[in-house]
Amino acid sequence: MRTLSIVIPALNEAENLPTVMDSIPRHELAEAGWAVDVIVVDNASTDATAEVARALGATVVSQPRRGYGNAYQAGFDAAEGDVIATGDADCTYPFDALPHLLHIMEARKVEFMTTNRLGVENRHAMKPSHTVANHALSALSRVLFRNGLRDSQSGMWIFQRHVWQAIQVESPGMAFSQEIKNAATRAGFRCLEVPIEYRVRGGQVKLNALPDGVANLRQLFQHKLRDNRLRVTPVRMVPLAEMARVNAAAERAAQAAERAAAVVEQLSAKRPAPEAAVDLVEGLPRSGRSTLASMPAQRTADEAPLEMA
């Protein structure tokens, strides 16, 4: 089965985690061929976030350094899935839509999928001031990076693991969200933005609108300057995507070879040792030996799969 790692940063979200974890459609994902690993990153919570996450079956990663970006860095480093999906622990993102989103991703051969929460159907789920700020930051991001994304601040992404291994994302805070999108699109990966349902937040709001907004503005210009410097060097950005694809294909081939070697070793271990066969023949009476010698050689059931392979 393919593996999906769902990474959820959490700061004092013990109250919301049961609802969030219950919204993950594990049975439907399994039917679609996905083995699921949920990673909750405890970002120095002062409540029972870690304990609740473990009790609900999640893998808990501790990140004592506060910050949205810091939490995701720790979660992505721990993720081993072929594909990584994200979302907040505040009940706003539709984890129940993952089977549909993964289907789109595979059908369109997308490497990095981000989501758009800013449709008019979601206007009730976000403060008007936050909606205006999101539109403004997204517009500036489009001007600077020319990637056409309508929602640069969305926190729900689905991407192949080799994308994360190939890009450079530095933001420790909320700006991580826009930086990972801009890095993935500028690196030349196949990207897509899709609309999602955005829901009313549960519990206490963690966003500090003015400081986070200023930090995001600063990061956009810093990233643009860094991006321009990279693009005037002989090694341009787009080949990063090609290199990541080649490395990912090589990794998959190596894993397949390891699995095949393990199967061969397991089958070989089932075959009777030559000494045991000789002992059986020696134990037969003389007439039995002649009968055995006249019988045509037959393959054992364990040898057949090896020949087919």
Image: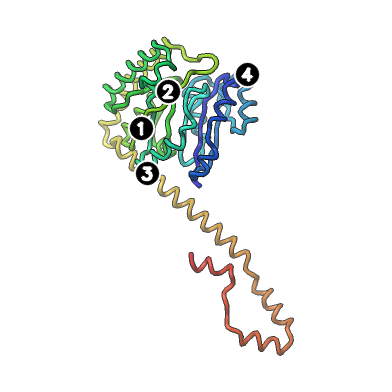
Instruction: Give SS at disc 2.
Output: loop
Q: CA distance from mark 3 to mark 1?
A: 13 Å
Q: In the rendered image, which residue does mark 4 sit on?
A: 47
Q: Residues within 10 Å of mark 3 (few under 14, many from 20)?
A: some
Residue 129 point in image, percent of width and height: 39, 10
Q: Residues within 10 Å of mark 4 (few under 14, many from 20)?
A: few
Q: In the rendered image, which residue does mark 1 sit on?
A: 184
Whether the residues at callouts 2 and 3 have beta carbons within 8 Å, the answer is no
Residue 129's disc is none
Residue 53 point in image, percent of width and height: 61, 28
Looking at the image, is mark 4 or mark 3 earlier in the sequence?
A: 4
Most extreme residue toward the front is 121
Q: Residue at x 71, y 78 (%)?
A: 280
Instruction: Give SS at disc 3.
Output: helix
Q: Nearer the viewer, residue 78 or 9?
A: 9
Instruction: Tell me the quarter of the picture where residue 268 sits.
Output: bottom right
**In the drawing, does residue 283 fall left or right of residue 176?**
right
Residue 171's disc is 2
Instruction: Note whether 237 is above or below 126 in the view shown.
Output: below
| Three-letter code for the amino acid on which mark 3 is drawn | Arg
Q: In the rendered image, which residue does mark 3 sit on?
A: 245
| Three-letter code for the amino acid on which mark 2 is drawn | Ser
Instruction: Give SS at disc 1.
Output: helix
Q: Residues within 10 Å of mark 1 (few under 14, many from 20)?
A: many
Q: Mark 1 or 2, which is nearer the eye?
A: 1
Q: CA distance from mark 4 to mark 2?
A: 26 Å
